[in-house]
Image: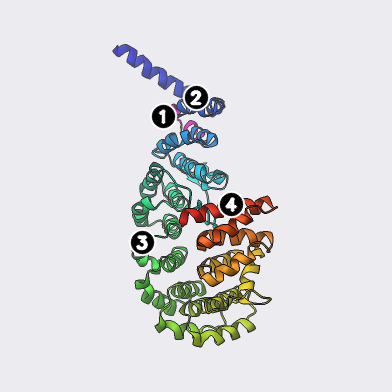
Amino acid sequence: MLRASILLVCGAASLFAQATAKDIRQIARGGSSAIPQLQEYLRDPSFEVRVEVVKALTDIGTQHSLEPLILATRDNDAEVQVRATDGLVNFYLPGYVRTGFGARVRRIGGQIQGRFTDTNDQVIPPHVEVRQEVVDAIGKLAGGGASMTSRANAARAIGILRGRAALPDLVESLKSKNSDVIYEALIAFQKIGDKSMGPEIAYLLRDFDQRVQLAAIETTGLLQNHEAVPQLLEVFRRSGDKRVRKAALTSMAMMPREEDRSLFLSHLQDRDEGLRQAAAEGIGRLRNPDDTAKLEAAFASERSGSARLSQAFGLVAHGRTEVAEFSPLQLLIATLSARSRQGEAYALLVEVGRDPKVREQLHRSLGIGTKDEKIYLARILALSGDETSVEPLERLSRDTDPDVASEALRAAQTLKSRL
């Protein structure tokens, strides 16, 4: 019996020693039925073979691939961890594996190198539910992967999957002292949107890495950490950097205090368009009727497209909810067709769209705009709509443009899951 066991182990070792990436690709042609055999090769001593196994499991892409991909996240090789993470995300966000970090990773010696894209706005729809084991596995990587690269990649994945259960792992990842890991964790906090996390990042408002500092300032506003407003004010007053000052005032504008009203008013006509933007948004959210005329004057004379959008937002918040030629709300809606600023208009409309009067106007505009306007208005109503938004979205789901129709259908599903 002992001799037989030794022969079995030696036979497995011999099999692994002879395996090549080509062999794995051949096995993978069997599709889902090949998954058990592929999983065995995750024990292969060659990282090239294990990497190829993870690629194959990702390509097969069924729910049966999840368990071996979770197993692969525990590998001691950073590239295997990265590709396993991307494979898990790809199951819930098809196509991600072609754009994720793993698609650009390369190996130099024993290290993997690559560059994270500056764009980090991907996130699964709210109605998509991710298995707990998947979030747990990726969370463990964020808190302690084989390399800082695999940890940063895992932190990004948690955000994309809205992995709330992994928040403690994200907090742990902040201790890494690695800027990439910390930055990705901050963006993940934004996507998950748990306001209790605000105090956890307050100490990063003065971080020496500007990218981290800017992300921390933005995250503080988005998570509505009101206790940090005095710190934001200090950063705004002491910093000589335009980007930091704009970020700090913008974050303050997300949670404006009446005592800061004069500060916002003083920058409504500032030479810096970024400060004009932040000031208009803060004044808009304060909703003091004495400031409406000042916003109207700024809106009428503004030449910067971005600042004008913020002023339009402020006026809509002050009750200018009519849709007419050159009206503030019409400008916001029309900008959804402008590729350079549609993201700005979208975020502002999501907020003002929670007002029933604004929402009623969005319902009316839903079926008469351009293709981009219809698509973005559907996304906005998915997040800001109420019961009255279901019927307009269902009507739009019968649009003659298949892209518009499918977006409206997804929006209706998301809205129903939220109600």
Does dot 1 land on a helix, a strand or a loop?
helix
User: Relative to the observer, which residue lies in front, 66 or 374?
Assistant: 374
Quarter of image, res 396 = bottom right
Name the residue that disc number 2 marks. Answer: 19
Mark positioned earlier in the residue sequence (2 or 1): 2
Task: Mark 2: give few (<14), some (14-19) or many (20+) Cα within 10 Å.
Answer: some
Residue 273, disc: none
Q: In 3D space, how far apart are the residues under numbered discs 2 and 3 (Cα atoms)? A: 47 Å
The residue under the point 51% across, 72% down is 243
The residue under the point 57% across, 82% down is 271
Q: What type of secondary structure mainly makes up the magenta span?
A: helix
Q: In 3D space, how far apart are the residues under numbered discs 4 and 2 (Cα atoms)? A: 46 Å
Residue 409, disc: 4
Q: Give, as a three-letter code, the residue at label 3.
A: Met
Task: Look at the numbered discs 2 and 1 and tell me whether their residues touch, using CB distance below 8 Å.
Answer: no
Point out the frontmost of discs 1 and 4.
Answer: 4
User: Relative to the observer, which residue lies in front, 81 or 188?
Assistant: 188
Q: In 3D space, how far apart are the residues under numbered discs 1 and 3 (Cα atoms)? A: 38 Å
Name the residue that disc number 1 marks. Answer: 43
Q: Position of residue 3 (x, y in %)?
A: 32, 12
Point out the frontmost of discs 2 and 3.
Answer: 3
Residue 27 against residue 269 in the figure, above or below: above
Name the residue that disc number 3 marks. Answer: 197
Mark positioned earlier in the residue sequence (1 or 3): 1
* Magenta-drawn stretch contains 41: yes
User: Relative to the observer, which residue lies in front, 314 or 364?
Assistant: 364
Task: Mark 3: give few (<14), some (14-19) or many (20+) Cα within 10 Å.
Answer: many
Q: Give, as a three-letter code, the residue at label 2.
A: Ala
Q: Give, as a three-letter code, the residue at label 1.
A: Arg
* Magenta-drawn stretch contains 111: no
Q: Which residues are magenta?
A: 39-52
Task: Mark 4: give few (<14), some (14-19) or many (20+) Cα within 10 Å.
Answer: many
